[in-house]
């Protein structure tokens, strides 16, 4: 029983799911029209939905990538047969159903379909990524990054009038938060594709590193990093968030820079890359959490 539960938690990537909950809460915090609105039940309902949607797309990714994982990640539950493919499909079906039903219920209750359509788009594109988009260099990475950013938009839809009144600093704050989530996720997805290059090559998956190589991929990482760093300073200089935000986001930028620079240093050596990639990937995950916390801090000070 314990091993089966561990396998389920592994296939849904439970360790990553709090980021989706946090992202949805952040969207709700940005879009609030008053302090009390942030604590309404719909905020938490949509944040739970985001977790189930992420669990679903993580599961279908493992199902479709089973042959690639035999090379890249031989300890994954489907590869080791800790759970069966049938069980995995059941997990996908249950999680994606809950992830769609909760926003649908909220939309019907509030006579607006924004929450449901955002959730539906996430579910469809997240699923199609595993079947089709992953085979397309960079475009597949951008789909994953877009879905992570949409979690913030899903949280914002808890304020049922927010998208009808798009104006002011709240819109800028929401757009920035989504762009931050997009670019930091794009960095991490590209790095993961570099890590998975051997399995992707053997299964003819046309990811960016497979098509263009390590050196070009490392250069692209630096380009995305530059865009992310420039974006991170805008909210402070635009007066949207203050010094507290700036301190935390500079820490996030520093962690990201360190993670990517470690990879860029060994761009011409796949052997050295594989010695460093796991740590750099973990650093990017930490950077994303710190960046989201920076935005949270900026918004909480504005409450």
Image (cartoon, rainbow, N blue to C red):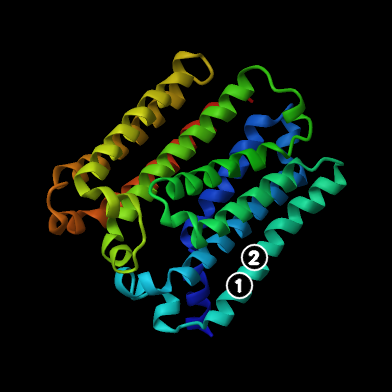
Q: Are marks 1 and 2 in contact (CB under 8 Å)?
A: yes
Residue for point 48% across, 76% down = 7
Q: Nearer the viewer, residue 142 or 44?
A: 142
Q: Position of residue 219 (x, y in %)?
A: 24, 38
Residue denoted by label 2: 95
Establish if 238 lies above or below 41: above
Q: Nearer the viewer, residue 20 or 111?
A: 111
Q: Position of residue 179 (x, y in %)?
A: 49, 33
Q: Position of residue 232 (x, y in %)?
A: 41, 26
Q: Secondary structure at mark 2?
A: helix
Looking at the image, which residue sits at the far top? 238
Quarter of the view holding residue 257: top left
Quarter of the view holding residue 114: top right
For the N terminus, give its image quadrant. Answer: bottom right
Residue for point 47% across, 60% down = 15
Separation (CA) of disc 1 from disc 2:
6 Å
Residue denoted by label 1: 91
Residue 300 in sight:
no
Establish if 71 lies above or below 209: below
């Amino acid at each position: 029983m314990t091993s089966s539960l561990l396998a389920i938690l592994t296939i849904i990537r439970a360790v990553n799911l709090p980021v989706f909950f946090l992202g949805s809460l952040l969207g709700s915090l940005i879009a609030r029209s008053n302090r009390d609105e942030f604590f309404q039940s719909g905020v938490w309902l949509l944040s739970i939905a985001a977790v189930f949607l992420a669990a679903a797309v993580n599961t279908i990714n493992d199902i479709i990538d089973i042959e690639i994982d035999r090379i890249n990640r031989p300890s994954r539950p489907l590869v080791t047969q800790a759970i069966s493919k049938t069980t995995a499909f059941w997990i996908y079906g249950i999680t994606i159903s809950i992830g769609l039903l909760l926003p649908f219920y909220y939309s019907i209750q509030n006579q607006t379909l924004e929450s449901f359509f955002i959730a539906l788009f996430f579910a469809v594109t997240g699923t199609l990524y595993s079947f089709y988009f992953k085979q397309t260099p960079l475009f597949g990475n951008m789909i994953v990054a877009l879905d992570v950013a949409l979690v913030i938009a899903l949280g914002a839809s808890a304020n049922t009038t927010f998208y009808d009144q798009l104006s002011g600093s709240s819109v800028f704050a929401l757009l920035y938060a989504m762009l931050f989530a997009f670019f930091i996720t794009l960095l991490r997805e590209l790095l993961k594709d570099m890590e998975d290059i051997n399995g992707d090559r053997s299964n003819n998956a046309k990811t960016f590193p497979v098509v263009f190589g390590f050196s070009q991929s490392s250069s692209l990482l630096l380009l995305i990093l530059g865009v992310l760093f420039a974006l991170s300073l805008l909210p402070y200089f635009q007066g949207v968030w203050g010094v507290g935000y700036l301190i935390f986001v500079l820490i996030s930028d520093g962690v990201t820079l360190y993670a990517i620079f470690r990879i860029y240093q060994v761009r011409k050596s796949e052997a050295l890359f594989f010695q460093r990639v796991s740590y750099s990937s973990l650093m990017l995950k930490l950077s994303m959490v710190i960046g989201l916390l920076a935005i949270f801090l900026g918004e909480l000070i504005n409450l």
